[in-house]
């Protein structure tokens, strides 16, 4: 009986050794495409999922799959395609905190008083595609998946968000958000209204149309305020602020208006032949 028990115990130890040894040598690439895509869906689109696409051709295919991205396109070829919306307001309403919304270039989108109360990133579709192609040479299939070419085959220049007259703003931010490489036009009022959170504006064009009432318009308005002062730099970085970089600002009474406790700081301007580019922060003094 003792010999039988010893044999059974030895078999148990051998099974444990085999299972532990297989786990040691197993890699994430042994998972099938569905499992990997499910794992990638939990990553923040930028920068984590973007960096994941640079690992290898398979990871690039899965990380760039349309199922993992929210897209806004004026003309939807397949209405049943998941994650594709005809307007920005619908995409924002269904987005999860931390999602990135890709806005297709080559069209005008009407945006009026759209409130954003969760962390989101709004990025020009063509810009993200160009960045991925420039850093990683992947197969033509991925280019087809991420294709945002016009009928003529040329890449459009921009996506224009238009705020009609009578609206206070195009987008109203009440959480930490980022807007990159988009054009926002406002007839009256402001292009971007910052209520709270950390707003990052990068590579955008903000335009207020010139008219006799342009003193009532302003490209950026911040009403963020706080009853307590923050002296610690670590805590200050998590407070309300606006950071603008490489952005063209045209029209309006002034580039930015602050109605709260924030103030304009660290201003840099570059005069180009056809435009003026701004870098500045709106932060607590």
Image (cartoon, helix red, strand yellow):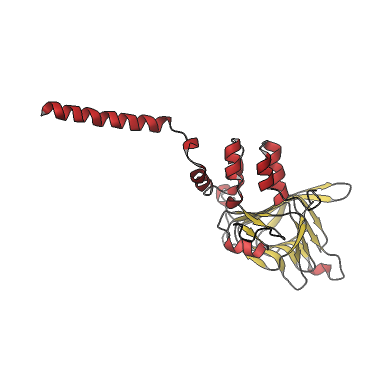
Residue 30 in view, yes or no: yes
46 or 197: nearer the viewer = 46
Image coordinates of residue 108 in percent, x first then y, are: 76, 61
2 or 132: nearer the viewer = 2
Image coordinates of residue 51 in percent, x first then y, are: 60, 40
Q: In the picture, which quadrant includes the N terminus?
A: top left
Residue at the bottom extreme, as displayed: 166
Q: Residue at x 68, y 37 (%)?
A: 135
Image coordinates of residue 174 in percent, x first then y, are: 61, 62
Decide if residue 41 is on the left or right side of residue 180.
left
Residue at the top extreme, as displayed: 3
Q: In the picture, which quadrant includes the C terminus?
A: bottom right
Q: Residue at x 71, y 68 (%)?
A: 112
Residue 244 in view, yes or no: no
How many marks on residues? 0
Image coordinates of residue 248 in percent, x first then y, are: 79, 53
99 or 27: nearer the viewer = 27
Decide if residue 217 is on the left or right side of residue 87.
right
152 or 132: nearer the viewer = 152
Where 260 falls versus 123 (above or below)?
A: below
Residue at the right extreme, as displayed: 273
Decide if residue 183 is on the left or right side of residue 19.
right
């Amino acid at each position: 009986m003792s010999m039988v028990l010893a044999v059974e115990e030895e078999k148990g130890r051998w099974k444990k050794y085999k299972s532990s040894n297989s786990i040691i040598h197993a890699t994430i690439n042994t998972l099938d495409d569905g499992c990997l895509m499910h794992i990638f869906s939990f990553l923040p689109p930028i920068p984590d999922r973007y960096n994941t696409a640079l690992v290898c051709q398979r990871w690039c295919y899965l990380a760039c799959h349309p199922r993992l991205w929210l897209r806004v396109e004026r003309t939807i070829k397949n209405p049943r395609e998941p994650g594709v919306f005809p307007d920005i307001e619908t995409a924002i309403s269904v987005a999860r905190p931390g999602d990135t919304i890709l806005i297709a270039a080559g069209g005008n989108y009407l945006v009026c008083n759209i409130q954003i109360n969760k962390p989101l990133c709004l990025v020009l579709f063509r810009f993200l595609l160009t960045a991925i192609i420039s850093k990683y040479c992947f197969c033509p299939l991925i280019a087809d998946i991420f294709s945002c070419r016009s009928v003529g085959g040329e890449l459009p220049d921009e996506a224009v968000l238009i705020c009609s007259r009578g609206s206070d703003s195009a987008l109203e931010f009440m959480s930490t958000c980022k807007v990159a490489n988009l054009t926002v036009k406002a007839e009256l009022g402001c292009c971007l209204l910052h209520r709270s959170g950390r707003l990052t504006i990068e590579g955008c064009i903000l335009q207020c149309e010139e008219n006799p009432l342009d003193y009532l318009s302003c490209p950026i308005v911040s009403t963020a305020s706080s009853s307590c002062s923050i002296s610690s730099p670590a805590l200050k970085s998590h407070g309300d602020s606006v950071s603008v970089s490489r952005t063209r600002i045209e029209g309006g009474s002034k580039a930015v208006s602050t109605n709260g406790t924030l103030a304009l700081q660290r201003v840099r301007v570059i005069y180009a032949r056809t435009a003026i580019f701004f870098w500045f922060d709106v932060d607590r003094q």
